Image (cartoon, rainbow, N blue to C red):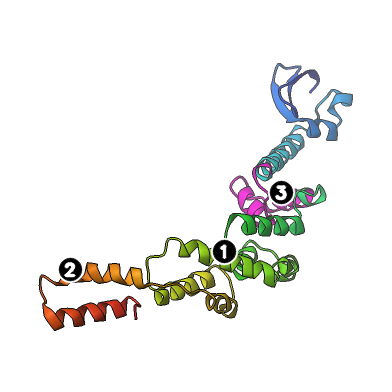
Amino acid sequence: MKIVKYIKISNDKYKIILENKETITLYEDVILKYELLLKKEITNIEEIFKYNQKYALYEKCLSYINKKIRSEQEIRTHLKKYTTNYDDIEDIILKLKENNFLNSSLYIKSYIHDKIYLSFDGPLKIKNDLLNLGFFEDDILLELEIFDDNLIKDRITKYINKQLKVNKKSIYVFKNKMLLNLINLGYLREDIIKYLNNINFNDNDLKEKEYEKLKKKYSKKYKGLELEQIIKRKLYEKGFQ
């Protein structure tokens, strides 16, 4: 089928008008691959359509990557929304790697950088998250060397001090809560305890406020020594000495 005219419809797409008045839309790379500008004729239209569809998937991946750096696993999951053709997926993954759009080292570095500056996540959580994204442990550990003693100390103490500003619990409850929170954030227990031991504050004002709240609550039902014993027990349960 002879090609009558090419009409550019975007940066990388052309509408092609055939001699029978039929129109098809192809990517520029597809046109170049099959030398359609030189031949000015389409003889293997099914093959061209198939390649054009694969190229459209590749473009979808580039658009997906442009929004945010992606892992290979994320790209595979994204592609499976549009095709079940295993060979097409593998070809696209290979092409992305060849063009350096899929770079494990760059992704891991970027991911760790974002977690350091946008969250309080620690090295253990970051490692597990990256493992779940399909990266190799040795590659992750190499980049996690940035978490030296100084960085760990800085992040743990900043997190504790931030929580301390809004704390309304006893020092005992506060420290236990910080220990649990920081373990969940991916820090080693021994590192957390080392810096928690340096945290001390006077919780007498908090205890006094809690005492008044408990007294108001239980004085309607209890009096005298019995009331004091109940208040003492409740304060003890809340971690006050």
Q: Nearer the viewer, residue 33 or 10?
A: 10
Q: Amino acid at mark 3?
A: Asp
Lateral position of residue 152 relative to residue 91, left or right: left
**Label annotation for residue 88:** 3
Q: Residues within 10 Å of mark 1 (few under 14, many from 20)?
A: few
- For label 3, the crowd category at 10 Å Cα-Cα, with few meaning under 14, some 14 to 19 and many 20 or more, is some
Q: Nearer the viewer, residue 180 or 46?
A: 180
Q: Residues within 10 Å of mark 2 (few under 14, many from 20)?
A: few
Q: Which residues are magenta?
A: 66-95
> Disc 1 vs disc 3: Cβ atoms closer than 8 Å?
no
- Residue 16 placement: quadrant: top right
Q: CA distance from mark 1 to mark 3?
A: 48 Å
Query: Which residue is depicted at the point 58% across and 79% down?
Result: 194
Residue at label 2?
Answer: 217
Label drawn at residue 158:
1
Residue 175 higher or lower than 229, as above or below: above
Amino acid residing under circle 2: Lys
> With respect to residue 17, does 147 lie above or below?
below
Residue depicted at x 67% and y 66%: 151
Going from N to C along the chain, the mark reached first, 1 or 2, is 1
The vertical placement of 58 against 2, above or below, is: below
Q: Nearer the viewer, residue 95 or 23?
A: 95
